[in-house]
Image (cartoon, helix red, strand yellow):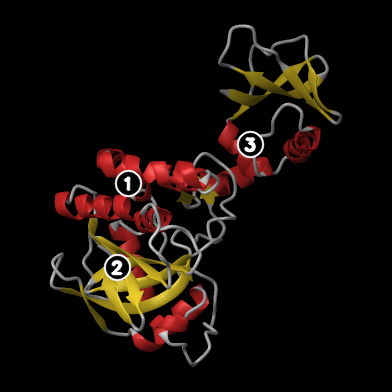
Amino acid sequence: MTKIVRSENAAGKNWYHLPTNRENIVVRQLTTAGLIVSSDKPLSWDVELSQSQVAQLVGKFPSVGEENHWKKLLSVLEGGKYQSKLSAEKNSILVPRTRLRSFRFAFRDWTKKLKREQAAFFASNVDCLQELWKLSVKEIEKYTYQESFHDRTEDLLRAESKALSKVKNTVDAATYFKSHYSSLAISLGNLVPSVTIQYLDREIAPLRTPNAQFVGGGAATTSGSGGMDLLLLAGNRVCAGEVKVGKDSELFEALLQAMWYGSELATQSQIERVAKCYGKNTLVKATIDIAVFSINQKPDPTREATVQLVKKINDEGKFKNLGNVYLFENNGEEWKAIS
């Protein structure tokens, strides 16, 4: 750990960069030129700022060589207004960075070979994915915010939708769902008798929280970026929907992305948020579903492992607050379960 402290000596009050996690620490003083190595180690101080507090003041905790950030921090500290800002931030909503979100961001940069091997790994080790999910949902349980999932005042989807077999992208798909599936019964064959899907919204950010802070520090300015393709109802459950069209991601990556977004909705507070924002007062309070819709895609090498994985998730039912996971693909103008 490292902290920033203010210490007083004969020259006045100065700010120091003070590492605390090793024996031979290097003390640096904050100056108008950036950080400079100091020959004096402060023995006492009247102000102490943690790394997360520094991040709140300047957007991040800078590395040693980032002179401009240290100059900016010194300016903020010497300006004397940092205390009121930290006091205000102390009471702001904290947005979690979950394990599943971090894993998903790392995964998307992997090679195709690695991604496919990960699908096989999780199919054989479902408890590892379960652990990621459980830890993520636990982190989201601490999060409370009850306003909109986006800042759109009007959804400007075109009025007419293309036929399902003519869908080319996620906007086409959202238009199709909004136009056709205010109430859609999809037969899942031998898995369950059927599920009724209802369209609610598109491109939502489950953790959108204006003027908030990330857990661990830093303004949560990215909490409203990105977007879950479809917000649906599966019966009376909230359902996270992910759409892949044509040459989009393979089936396992689509499932992983859907589970990432789904984990960010799988708490009572988030379900209450959906109920409030969309006027749905009969939602199941402690469970969500997940659905992947593959449109005009050919079977890929992750298909078998993904189907096996989903079957284990559904059969074992050990994923906290997760009901059913559905995999659909189109056959022309009809939906069928991927199996």
Residue beneath disc 1:
133
What is the C-alpha distance between the residues marked 3 and 2?
38 Å
Q: Quadrant of the N terminus?
A: top right
Where does the image place residue 29, in percent across and percent down from the top left? 76, 21
Q: Nearer the viewer, residue 196 or 68?
A: 196
Q: Nearer the viewer, mark 3 or mark 1?
A: 1
Marks 1/2 in contact by CB < 8 Å: the verdict is no
Q: Quadrant of the C terminus?
A: bottom left
Mark closer to the chain start, 3 or 2: 3
Q: Amino acid at mark 1?
A: Trp
Disc 2 on helix, strand or loop? strand
Measuring 28% from the left and 77% from the top, which residue is drawn there?
Answer: 197
Residue beneath disc 2:
238
Where does the image place residue 213, in percent across and percent down from the top left? 54, 49
Q: Nearer the viewer, mark 3 or mark 2?
A: 2
Residue beneath disc 3:
54
Measuring 21% from the left and 67% from the top, which residue is drawn there?
Answer: 284
Q: Residues within 10 Å of mark 1 (few under 14, many from 20)?
A: many
What is the C-alpha distance between the residues marked 1 and 2?
17 Å
- Label for residue 338? none
Q: Amino acid at mark 2?
A: Val
Q: Nearer the viewer, residue 241 or 73?
A: 241
Where does the image place residue 304, in percent across and percent down from the top left? 30, 53
Q: Choose top left, top right, bottom left or bottom right for residue 237.
A: bottom left
Mark closer to the chain start, 1 or 2: 1
Q: Amino acid at mark 3?
A: Val
Mark closer to the chain start, 3 or 1: 3
